[in-house]
Amino acid sequence: MPDDRAACDRRKFLHDLAKLPCATLLLGVVGPLETLATETEEGEEYYAMGIQVDRCIGCGLCVQACKTENDVPQEPYFFRTWVEHYEIHDDGSATVESPEGGIHGFPPGDDDRDVLRSFFVPKLCNQCDNPPCVQVCPVGATFKTEDGVVLVDQDYCIGCRYCIQACPYGARYLDPRTKTADKCTFCYHRITKGLLPACVEVCPTQARVFGELGTRSSPLHRMKRQDSLHVLKPSLNTEPKVLYANLDGEVR
């Protein structure tokens, strides 16, 4: 495990990460920019994301923004966030597709009369409060910050893939350029400056909501008052901090 010097290096890593310049988003639709609240009721920041499923239109702008902002490898099978399209049929079966992570949106479907309902579900790292990826990392490269965000220190990561295998949400990948694990960070370099994650900023329907748990002025707090929220795979007790409103029971 890292010694005291390693802990200092980690603090420097977080400090340097917060200074990263934001990539320019060359996208046609940009949502309103909001400033995050800086204090919770306990005086601490604790970040979380809410997703209003009924508002997602599957446009793929969030996936594009994430790739651009975070320099995600351009091959279509590497994503920090992606969108899945669900179709529920009248025989009770469900089909799920996510062509190239939904980065180019979804083509209009056929007039399939056996489809009872269809919807889009954005997915990403769930920033678990009890993260299995942190538990299995043999060198402490994957860790949770004081404000609840799970990050990867690439200087420590040895590319063993244990965290990738341990993640029950399929949210991690091995970066082919660095041979280290990577995933969504809630755009940590942005939120520590009071900005929104790139995927939240560009969403044209405001399907994604970002804020701090326990902060009354947070958009997430207002969303919690209006909707019944759910998490993915609650039986695993990972305590996710990605919360879904209007989530269909077929979503896994």
Image (spheres, helix red, strand yellow):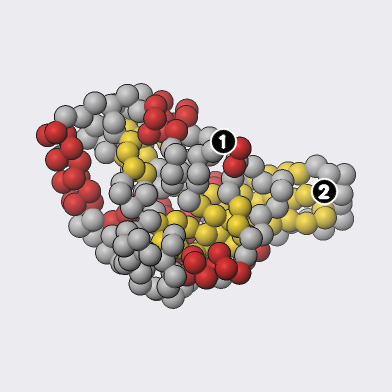
Left or right: 191 in relation to 76: left
At 32% from the left edge and 38% from the top edge, which residue is drawn?
143
Q: Position of residue 245 (x, y in %)?
A: 62, 59
Where is the C terminus found, in terms of image quarters?
top right
Q: Position of residue 177 (x, y in %)?
A: 31, 36
Report the mark closest to the observer, 2 or 1. 1
Along the line of sight, the residue nearer the viewer: 86 or 52: 52
Can see residue 12? Answer: yes
Where is the N terminus found, in terms of image quarters?
top left
CB-based contact (under 8 Å), mark 2 and mark 1: no
Left or right: 208 in relation to 151: right
Q: Secondary structure at mark 2?
A: strand
Q: Label 1, on which residue?
A: 236
Disc 2 from disc 1: Cα separation: 28 Å
Left or right: 9 in relation to 187: left
At 73% from the left edge and 56% from the top edge, which residue is drawn?
118
At 83% from the left edge and 44% from the top edge, which residue is drawn?
92
Left or right: 154 in relation to 30: left
Q: Secondary structure at mark 1?
A: helix
Along the line of sight, the residue nearer the viewer: 12 or 74: 12
Above or below residue 96? Residue 68 is below
Q: Amino acid at mark 1?
A: Leu
Dot placed on the residue nearer the N-terminal end, 2 or 1: 2
Report crowding for label 2: few under 14, some 14 to 19, many 20 or more residues within 10 A (C-alpha): some
Along the line of sight, the residue nearer the viewer: 73 or 115: 115
Q: Which mark is residue 117?
A: none
Along the line of sight, the residue nearer the viewer: 223 or 177: 223
Q: Which mark is residue 89?
A: 2
At 39% from the left edge and 27% from the top edge, which residue is drawn?
136
Q: Amino acid at mark 2?
A: His
Can see residue 99? Answer: no
